[in-house]
């Protein structure tokens, strides 16, 4: 016969009590009185709780400094031109790369510009200097929107700092405000615009607009407030595509650069990368000239022209066709018209489509002006003098930092004018 069941239960309990009483942990717990945790600490979560993952460590404002980038080698330049042709012509990938290879084989212009770019500082070094100074200036100018974090972003897909990656990095870091600030006032006419559209489209996959009805204008989602899915991060998105060319800070920055040389030239030619319409370039140029007339009594004539960039293949061949609609707005045509008006002094070429000296200002425009001096038929040597606005090191260009800081201040204090559905005619109160 087996003993009854309570006998086994009593024996098992006595064995467990004897073993636990002999352990040092049990002796230590018996010697020390039990401690009670406060209710707040008892209900607190551990530091790496799953519900706390994704919280922003530091909120604030992130400013993306948009620029077109630069071709470091012929390989990267050929790859970028292939992608530009694929997006512009809507052709397969192999067709775009084949056209880019054909262009490099037939034209020595891009290779010569890349070889000349080694004599100028790289955009990476200039942008690192600019973003550090701009962060300090914004911290003093707008402390209520801080802390500020400035990131350079390019439109080249093969670059490590392209727009898509920088947007993803800014969202993961945690932000309250996100500002897309182009260093090229006419950025909507460049491949950078296509990169911005792709980045915003990719951002829509991981974010959600707070507006119930999100319309689309010019390829942008017309919404300001975005909430990141599966994350407590929300932010306001502001983009100034071409508004910077209408502000007072941009005009004063151009005046400060032109005014010391204003009396030495007979006329000024403002230029931008095509296909920028001259009707869009003339208002900004007119404001710059009116500001110059306040400082100088000289009535200097001026014209507006367009030129091609390094990432626009075959455009210098198209310029030779007289039936193209932009033929009368080329640099050669503007110089010819000014000479026919009787202006025999030197001419100054001022690029209005970039706030910093980029690859086109360093290489493309000097090459075009050098070719212009050779092809221009003039009776005297003085009529062939066409100069580009002298560049200065970015480390000495404190006026650029102040102008950008003032523009960011204007955007942050007037956010309704710089949401994604901004008008095309510019601010009216500037």
Image: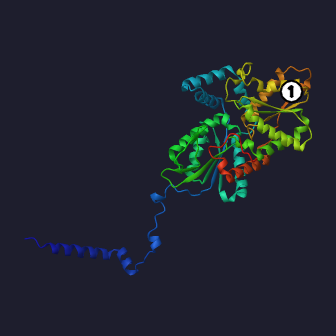
Name the image quarter holding residue 83. Answer: top right
Tell me if residue 258 comes above or below residue 401 in the rendering: above
Residue that extends furthest to the left in the rendered view of this protein = 1
Mark 1: give few (<14), some (14-19) or many (20+) Cα within 10 Å: many
> Coloring scheme of the render?
rainbow
Q: Is residue 130 left or right of residue 175?
A: right
Percent across and percent down for residue 375 are 82, 20
Tell me if residue 259 comes above or below residue 365 in the rendering: below
Between 325 and 137, the residue placed more toward the observer is: 325
Percent across and percent down for residue 340 are 88, 23
Residue in the picture at 64% in, 34% down: 191
Q: Is residue 116 left or right of residue 38?
A: right
Name the image quarter holding residue 138. Answer: bottom right
Between 205 and 101, the residue placed more toward the observer is: 205
Percent across and percent down for residue 29 are 38, 77
Does dot 1 land on a helix, a strand or a loop? helix
Residue 287 visible to an observer of this rendering:
yes
State the quadrant of the N terminus. Answer: bottom left
Residue in the picture at 62% in, 42% down: 161
Residue 132 visible to an observer of this rendering:
no
Tell me if residue 162 comes above or below residue 315 in the rendering: below
Between 296 and 12, the residue placed more toward the observer is: 296
Residue in the picture at 88% in, 41% down: 293
Q: Which residue is tagged 1?
A: 338
Q: Is residue 89 left or right of residue 354?
A: left
């Amino acid at each position: 016969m087996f003993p009854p069941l309570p006998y086994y239960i009593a024996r098992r309990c006595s064995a467990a009590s004897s073993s636990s009483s002999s352990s040092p942990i049990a002796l230590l717990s018996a010697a020390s009185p039990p401690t009670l945790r406060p209710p707040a600490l008892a209900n607190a979560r551990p530091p790496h709780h799953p519900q706390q993952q994704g919280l922003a460590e530091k909120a604030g404002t992130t400013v993306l400094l948009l620029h077109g980038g630069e071709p470091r080698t012929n390989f990267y330049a050929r790859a970028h031109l292939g992608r530009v042709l694929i997006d512009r012509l809507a052709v397969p990938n192999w067709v775009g790369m084949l056209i880019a290879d054909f262009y490099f084989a037939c034209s020595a212009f891009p290779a010569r510009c890349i070889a000349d770019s080694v004599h100028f500082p790289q955009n990476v070094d200039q942008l690192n200097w600019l973003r550090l100074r701009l962060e300090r200036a914004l911290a003093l100018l707008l402390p209520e929107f801080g802390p500020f974090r400035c990131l350079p972003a390019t439109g080249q897909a093969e670059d490590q700092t392209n727009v898509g990656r920088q947007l993803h990095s800014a969202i993961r870091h945690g932000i309250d405000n996100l500002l897309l600030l182009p260093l090229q006032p006419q950025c909507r006419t460049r491949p950078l615009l296509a990169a911005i559209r792709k980045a915003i489209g990719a951002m829509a996959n991981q974010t959600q607009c707070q507006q119930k009805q999100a319309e689309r204008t010019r390829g942008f989602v017309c919404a300001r407030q975005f909430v990141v899915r599966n994350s407590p991060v929300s932010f306001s998105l502001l983009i100034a595509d071409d508004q910077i060319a209408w502000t007072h800070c941009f005009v004063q920055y151009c005046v400060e650069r032109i005014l010391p040389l204003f009396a030495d030239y007979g006329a000024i030619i403002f230029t931008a990368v095509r296909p920028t319409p001259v009707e869009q370039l003339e208002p900004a140029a007119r404001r710059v000239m009116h500001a110059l007339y306040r400082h100088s009594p000289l009535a200097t004539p001026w014209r507006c022209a367009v030129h091609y960039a390094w990432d626009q293949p075959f455009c210098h061949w198209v310029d030779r066709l007289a039936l193209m609609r932009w033929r009368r707005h080329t640099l050669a045509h503007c110089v010819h018209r000014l000479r026919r008006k009787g202006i025999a002094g030197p001419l100054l070429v001022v690029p209005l489509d970039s706030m910093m000296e980029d690859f086109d200002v360093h290489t493309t425009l000097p090459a075009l002006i050098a070719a212009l001096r050779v092809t221009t038929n003039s009776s005297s040597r003085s009529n062939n003098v066409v100069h580009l606005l002298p560049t200065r090191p970015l480390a000495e260009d404190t006026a650029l930092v102040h102008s950008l800081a003032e523009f960011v201040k204007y955007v942050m204090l007037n956010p309704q004018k710089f949401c994604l559905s901004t008008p095309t005619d510019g601010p009216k109160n500037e």
